[in-house]
Image (spheres, coloured by chain):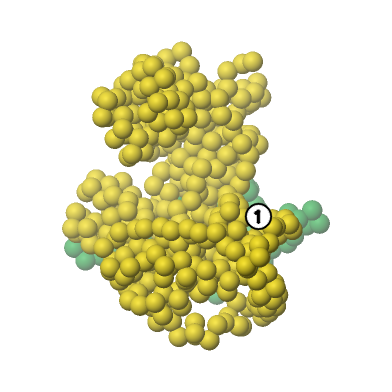
Chain colours: A green, B yellow
Amino acid sequence: MQTIKHVKQPVAVVVTVSRDGQVRPKKFQWKDGHTYTIDRVTKVERAASTKVGGCGIRYTVMVEGLPRFLYDEEGKWFMEDEVLIEVTE
Amino acid sequence: MSERAILHIDMNNFYASVECMLNPDLKKYPIAVCGSQEERHGIVLAKNYKAKAFGVSTGEAIWQAKQKCPNLVTVPPHYEQYMRFSKLARQIYGRYTDLVEPFGMDEVWADVTGCQHFIGSPFHIAEEIKETVKYELGLTVSIGVSFNKIFAKLGSDMKKPDAITVIPKESFKEKIWDLPATDMLGVGRATEKKLSSVGIHTIGQIAQFPVDFFQRKLGKCGVDLWRFANGMDDSQVTVRDIEAPDKTVGHGMTALQDLENDAEVWKFILELCQDIGHRLYVFNKKATGIAIAVRDNQLFTKQWQCGLPVPTQSPSCIAKEAFSLFTRSYDWRNPIRSLTVRAINLMSLDTPCQLDMFSDPIRVAKAESLDKAIEELRYRFGKKIIRNACLLDNPKMSPHDNPDIIMPTGVPM
C-alpha cells in the first residue's frame, strides 16, 4: 500500500538583503534542479513546521500562483515536500 | 503594593519533545532520550507521554525501560538543539517581561507584575505565551500562575501538558493544601522522611504545624518550608542566565571500563584536571581546596575534600593533590566506575594569600607559568595540540571526553 509522507526538502535560495538587514527570498532551486521565481512574499513570521519538523523564520511565498512555506532555519533553508512511500502492513 | 503576578513556565518533556518536534515520525512511538550505552551513560534522560504510560521513568537504565516497554524507541541526546530551543523560548518570554529567571534548561519564572495594564491579565499573558511557544517552536508548555514563585512552580506541575493552572491568593488553601508535601519545591526525599515520621504528609499539614517545630527539626530550611506552605514566599524573580557557578569548578566522568589500579586513576584525574585548570583560567579564579567523588562499580559513592597548600589554578598541581587525596582515602574495596574532581573554595586570581613556612610557592608559580604557556598554545592551535604523554593512550576514557554541556541544568562551557 502506498501512502503520502511529508519530508523536509532542503533548497538553495537566492535572497536579497536590504540595507537595514531585511532578508527577502527571490528564487529557490527545487530538488529536480528547476529554479522557481518567488512572485511575492505574503507573510514573514517565526513558526514551526509541524509536518516535517524544525522551526525558524517562515516565509509564506507565492509561486506560480500558489502559496508555499519556505523556512529559514538558522541559515539553512527548507520546504515541506510530499513523497509517496510503500507501507507494509 | 499590588499583588505580584508570577508565572512558572515548564516545557513539557523537554528533550523528548524537541526530538519529536525535529523528527515528527517519532511522535507515534514511545520514545526515550538516552545516554550512550557504549560510554556507560545508558540511562533514560527524558521520555514522552507514550513511554511514560508504560511506566518508563527518568534515570532508569535502558534495559529496565525496555523491560517495561519492549517497543521503546531510544534516541541519543542533541544538546545543541536543546540549548537552541531553550534560548528561543526565552526570547518569547522576553517579549512580555525582562524579569525572567531560568531554573534549568526547560523551566523559568517570569514576573509579569505590572504588565496587566499593557498586555492583559496574568492568565491572558500565560495563554499567549503557551500558544506562541506552540506556534513558533512546536513545543508545549505548562504554566503556573500565582502570587509567588513556589506556588507558580506548584501550579505548573499540577496540569500537564499544554495547560495553565492559576493559584490565586484568595483560594490557595483549597487548591493546594491537600496536595502531598513532596509536591512543594524544597521537600526532597530526606525532608519527606523526616516529615512523615511525625505524621506530616500534606502541604496543609506543614502550614498548620507550629513554626517552632520546623525550626527545631529542620532549621532555617524548615522555617522556609512553613512560610512557603502558608503562601509567604517573597523571593524575587532574579534576572540571570545559566552561568557556570563560580563557587566550585568540577569535572566528572564515567570510565568506559572500571578503573582497577592507581595508575589508571592517575591518568583519569590528570585528564579531568586539564578541563578544570582551563575553566579556572577562563574564570580568573584559583582554588584553595579540592574535592573528589568516587563511585565504585556497586554504584556506591563517597566524597573527600582537603585544602591546597598554596591556592592555584594549575591543572598539574590540582591533579597531584587530588591523586594524593585519593590514595590516602580510597581503600580499593571495589573497582571504580566514575570519578569527579572539583576545585573548591575559589578565590579571585588577584586575591593576596597567606603563605606558610612549609609549602613551596615558587614551585607552584613555576607550574602555573608552564600551564599558562600550555593554555596559550591550546588557545592558538586547538585543544589537542599539547597533552601529557601519559594521556595519549587512555583506553578507559571516552573519546568525547569533554562534553559541551554538563547535565542536567545545562552549564555551557
Residue B339 point in image, percent of width and height = 41, 66
Is B269 drawn above or below residue B113 in the view shown?
A: below
Q: Is residue B94 left or right of residue B396?
A: right
Q: Name the residue tied to disc 1.
A: B347
| Residue B379 seen from this side | no
Residue B212 point in image, percent of width and height = 41, 20
Q: Is residue B319 left or right of residue B75?
A: right
Residue A8 point in image, percent of width and height = 46, 63
In the picture, which quadrant includes the N terminus of chain B? top right
Is A66 drawn above or below residue B332 in the view shown?
A: above
Is B170 drawn above or below residue B185 in the view shown?
A: above
* Category of crowding for the residue at label 1, using alpha-carbon neighbours closer than 10 angstroms: few (below 14), some (14–19), many (at least 20): many
| Residue B56 seen from this side | yes
Residue B173 point in image, percent of width and height = 39, 16
**Residue at disc 1, secondary structure:** strand
Is A71 drawn above or below residue B119 in the view shown?
A: below
**Front-most of residues A5 and B321:** B321
Quarter where residue B91 is shown: top right
In the picture, which quadrant includes the C terminus of chain B? bottom right
Q: Amino acid at mark 1?
A: Met
Q: Is residue B118 left or right of residue B242?
A: right
Q: Is residue A15 left or right of residue A77?
A: right
**Front-most of residues B329 and A71:** B329
Residue, x 46% and y 22% (percent of image)?
A: B227
